[in-house]
Image (cartoon, grey):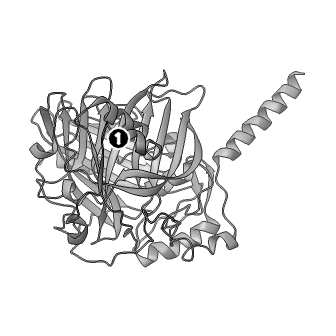
């Protein structure tokens, strides 16, 4: 009896693992890329109502440094309608639970909805690599992509973890330096500003020198942040080598604290440990909407749905908006936010038995054109909506890539919210940078602290 039970338990475990793994698509399905699907897997056609347009890819323009997000035609538009507490029931089926909570809680909260535009596109090299990945790349378990190179690994997703990997591995340029300004906003609108400078070297999504991901190897990016303000946090460094896999095979991280005056390994740079300097308002795996290991959750691909999401957010992300104008009591200044109707992949992550995280359940909304997480509903262990993450999607015409500026985390229990990833009052992204091979090492960081 015990032997039979062990066999059944093992079979069940293998079934669950298979549900989490991702299979390659066959050649016939991959042939849809560039035909009825865009080269990265979105539906080319608009919807039958005409409220979501056909995909019309933009042309590259602008310099790789000094460019704030902008599109004069889109930015000149006016809202076509506004969602508020009074009329939210009319649009409830296209709203995240986080937006419903904000609308029902605050009379001042609103969502200005604009015409939808689908201009997001990518370099030709990413298109070509994505098509190869479709029939070659597999997900052996939620943290182990295999035989993947350069492009989106899973343009036609079959499992919940696959859209998350598309988000994590998307093309963003060869390397970048950016300012990351963060604000903890109190319910009365007062805020504390923290300023970081971040350097990133992309390995997997590098057109010049791509690093493939296999079951045995694959370091897909290197990251270094330096806190420059306020004075009590200035001089803090966080170094991360992001890899596929878990544990020692996955992320490696180091932390330099001015108080200790030395750099040390930091295994806590993971999951639901608070990011340094955020006073607990952002976990490490909420950076870039989601990053790091997937191992603590079971991942389910719910399907695709039309939703109102923050999109073409050039106004709120650009130099014309100051931080004091962005911040309002209870929530972001919603006169600056822009929402559009788009198709998103919905992915649900449920905590695995025997593991732990502050969030028992997470629901991700991933834009089909940009493979970018635009919103996340985060639930606590009582199955209550605990936080809501909102990433305002922008398109970089200069690099042909997509990111989110700003990113906002609403804390429903405290009434505070956290703004991150802003650079409005500093320099925009510098995509011309290059780093020496030893730049992203603990020894290099230690030297920086003595200058």
Q: Is residue 42 above or below residue 271?
A: below
Tell me the residue at 50%/41% (across/down). 248
Q: Quadrant of residue 287?
A: top left
Residue 118 percent coordinates (x, y):
39, 67
Q: Does residue 308 appear to the left or right of 30 in the view shown? A: left
Of residues 411 and 335, the one drawn nearer to the viewer in this rendering: 335
Residue under pointer 1: 87
Q: Is residue 270 visible?
A: no
Residue 108 percent coordinates (x, y):
22, 36
Q: Quadrant of residue 379?
A: top left
Residue 301 percent coordinates (x, y):
58, 48
Q: Residue furthest right?
A: 1
Tell me the residue at 61%/50% (across/down). 159
Residue 386 percent coordinates (x, y):
39, 28
Q: Quadrant of residue 139?
A: bottom right
Of residues 89 and 343, the one drawn nearer to the viewer in this rendering: 89
Q: Is residue 8 above or below residue 87?
A: above
Callout 1 secondary element: loop
Q: Quadrant of the N terminus?
A: top right
Sort mark 1 into few (<14), some (14-19) or many (20+) by Cα contacts within 10 Å.
few
Q: Is residue 163 visible?
A: yes
Q: How many marks?
A: 1
Tell me the residue at 47%/60% (across/down). 368
Of residues 206 and 63, the one drawn nearer to the viewer in this rendering: 63
Q: Does residue 43 appear to the left or right of 81 in the view shown? A: right
């Amino acid at each position: 009896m015990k032997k039979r039970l062990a066999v059944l338990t093992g079979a069940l475990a293998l079934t669950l693992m298979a549900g989490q793994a991702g299979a390659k698509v066959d050649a016939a399905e991959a042939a849809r890329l560039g035909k009825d699907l865009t080269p990265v897997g979105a539906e080319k056609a608009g919807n039958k109502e005409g409220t979501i347009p056909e995909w019309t890819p933009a042309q590259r323009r602008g310099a790789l440094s000094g460019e704030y997000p902008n599109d004069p035609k889109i930015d000149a538009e006016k809202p076509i309608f506004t969602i508020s507490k009074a009329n939210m029931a009319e649009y409830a089926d296209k709203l995240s639970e986080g937006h419903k909570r904000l609308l029902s809680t605050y009379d001042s909260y609103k969502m200005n909805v604009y015409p939808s535009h689908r201009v997001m596109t990518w370099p030709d090299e990413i298109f070509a690599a994505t098509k190869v990945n479709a029939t070659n790349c597999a997900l052996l378990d939620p943290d182990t992509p295999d035989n993947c190179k350069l492009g989106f690994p899973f343009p036609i997703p079959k499992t919940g973890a696959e859209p998350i990997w598309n988000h994590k591995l998307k093309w963003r340029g060869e390397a970048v330096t950016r300012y990351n300004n963060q604000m903890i906003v109190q319910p009365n609108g007062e805020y504390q500003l923290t300023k970081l400078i971040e350097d990133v070297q992309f390995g997997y999504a590098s057109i010049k020198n791509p690093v493939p991901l296999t079951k045995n190897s694959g370091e897909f990016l290197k990251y270094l942040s330096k806190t420059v303000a306020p004075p009590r946090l200035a001089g803090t460094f966080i170094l991360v080598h992001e890899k596929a896999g878990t544990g020692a095979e996955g992320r490696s991280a180091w932390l330099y604290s001015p108080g200790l005056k030395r750099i040390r390994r930091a295994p806590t740079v993971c999951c639901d440990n608070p990011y340094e300097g955020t006073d607990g308002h952002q976990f490490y795996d909420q950076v870039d909407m989601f990053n790091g290991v997937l191992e603590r959750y079971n991942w389910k691909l719910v399907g695709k749905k039309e939703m109102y999401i923050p999109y073409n957010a050039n106004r709120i992300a650009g130099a014309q908006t100051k931080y004091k104008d962005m911040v309002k009591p209870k929530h972001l200044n919603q006169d600056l936010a822009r929402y559009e109707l788009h198709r998103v992949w919905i992915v649900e992550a449920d905590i695995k038995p025997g593991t732990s995280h502050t969030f028992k359940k997470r629901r991700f909304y991933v834009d089909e054109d940009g493979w970018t997480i635009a919103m996340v509903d985060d639930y606590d262990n009582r199955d209550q909506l605990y936080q809501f993450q909102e990433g305002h999607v922008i398109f970089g015409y200069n690099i042909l890539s997509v990111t989110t500026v700003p990113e906002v985390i609403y804390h429903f229990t405290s009434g505070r919210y956290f703004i991150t990833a802003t650079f409005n009052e500093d320099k925009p992204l510098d995509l011309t940078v290059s780093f020496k091979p030893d730049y992203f090492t603990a020894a290099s960081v230690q030297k920086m602290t003595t200058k």
